[in-house]
Image (spheres, rainbow, N blue to C red):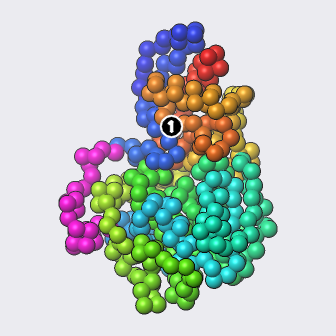
Amino acid sequence: MTDTVTAPDVRGVTKPATKPARPFFSSGPCAKPPGWDAAALATASLGRSHRSKIGKQRLQYCIDLMREVLKLPETHRIGIVPGSDTGAFEMAMWTMLGARGVTALAWESFGEGWVTDAVKQLKIDPTVIRADYGQLPDLAAIDWSTDVLFTWNGTTSGVRVPNADFIPADREGLSFADATSGVFAYDIDWAKIDVATFSWQKVLGGEGAHGVLILGPRAVERLENYTPAWPLPKVFRLVSKGKLAEGVFKGETINTPSMLAVEDAIFALEWGKSLGADGKGGGLIARSDANAAALDRIVEERDWLGHLAVDPATRSKTSVCLTVEGADEALIKKMASLLEAEGAAYDVAGYRDAPAGLRIWCGATVDTADIEALGPWLDWAYAVAKGA
């Protein structure tokens, strides 16, 4: 943390004496890992073909690290694909949906986006199970004879599924999990997940533009035994001559990746691996837990702050959405601007489609001390914005 001179604001509100050392609380792209430095990235692959020996080696190494850190079983394949998490999830939808009925869960904007894709683009008539921002839909109402689309952790609502227990082992349909704000922060039961997607820019703090597609054996079977009725763009094609294009899951990407972004992801993954399950940093999941707990304490100590997700069992530990007493869009914008101008917190306004409030990223790349230092600054920004 960085000490600053305590000085009264022009309105008589005293500024805190200490700022977060790294005031990066954006929910995507998220804070870089502690100790990150562009000069620390490996550069031998830069300027080389991604299909060169070193290019393939680095892409495969990145995949191997993701498998190791996620504790992903060998039954599941990992592919680096274009278009960030959105591209990865749409690739899964376009290539596998249509074989049976579809159920889509929507409790925040990205879940609603998958509903729009299914209805307006793929012309599928899904069963949609919705809930308002801050709530989780009735998971017991899911018909698992259908393919099921859901977000593991709602980035824009701060609501998550509690675990994978709601997914039956004997399901007939496939489970599609948009897990971009969930991987590396929760212990995911991979036996229950047929398709998962994410991007490096979330819990790893990596660069954007690239997505990751994880396929379980049931998803592979679907790909090899079902051909969708609609045409597929080249960047979505995962099957060649009726068989899975295995190269995609060995670092032979469909289109040209940014090797700089790959090296950046490798840096973050090596950092995450170095923490270990019980390492000095507590492990990625433990760091997220500690950050969320620190923010919980801040909320509990202030009667003007609250959680949009009221139920702790379904409250995000990464993208934490907060309510602010009497807040409207203008007040939140003012608070966020004040905090940014002071270098105390960046990008903390809630998502544009969500109820007016704050959104604080508590993923593993954030330091708990910086969350703790944020509390007094929220008090200051609220007081000044209300006074204005």
The kind of residue on which mark 1 rests is Asp
Residue 163 % position (x, y):
66, 62
The answer to which image quadrant residue 179 occupies is bottom right
| Residue 118 shows up from this direction | yes
Quadrant where the image shows the N terminus: top left
Residue 24 % position (x, y):
46, 38
Quadrant where the image shows the C terminus: top right
The answer to which image quadrant residue 97 occupies is bottom right
The foreground one among 89 and 22 is 89
Residue 283 % position (x, y):
48, 53
Q: How many labels does the image show?
A: 1
Left or right of residue 384, residue 33 in this image = left
Which residue sits at x=36%, y=76%?
250
Left or right of residue 374, residue 257 in this image = left
* Residue where numbered disc 1 is placed: 347
Which residue sits at x=41%, y=61%?
210
Q: Is mark 1 on a helix, strand or loop?
A: loop
Q: Where 168 sits versus 18, above or below?
A: below
Q: Is residue 115 magenta?
A: no
Q: Is residue 43 magenta?
A: yes
Q: Where 379 sits versus 322, above or below?
A: above
Which residue sits at x=63%, y=27%?
331
| Residue 168 shows up from this direction | no
Q: What stretch is highlighted in magenta?
A: 36-59
Which residue sits at x=57%, y=36%?
349
Left or right of residue 308, residue 272 in this image = left
Q: Where 384 sits versus 238, above or below?
A: above
Left or right of residue 5, residue 52 in this image = left
Residue 30 % position (x, y):
46, 46
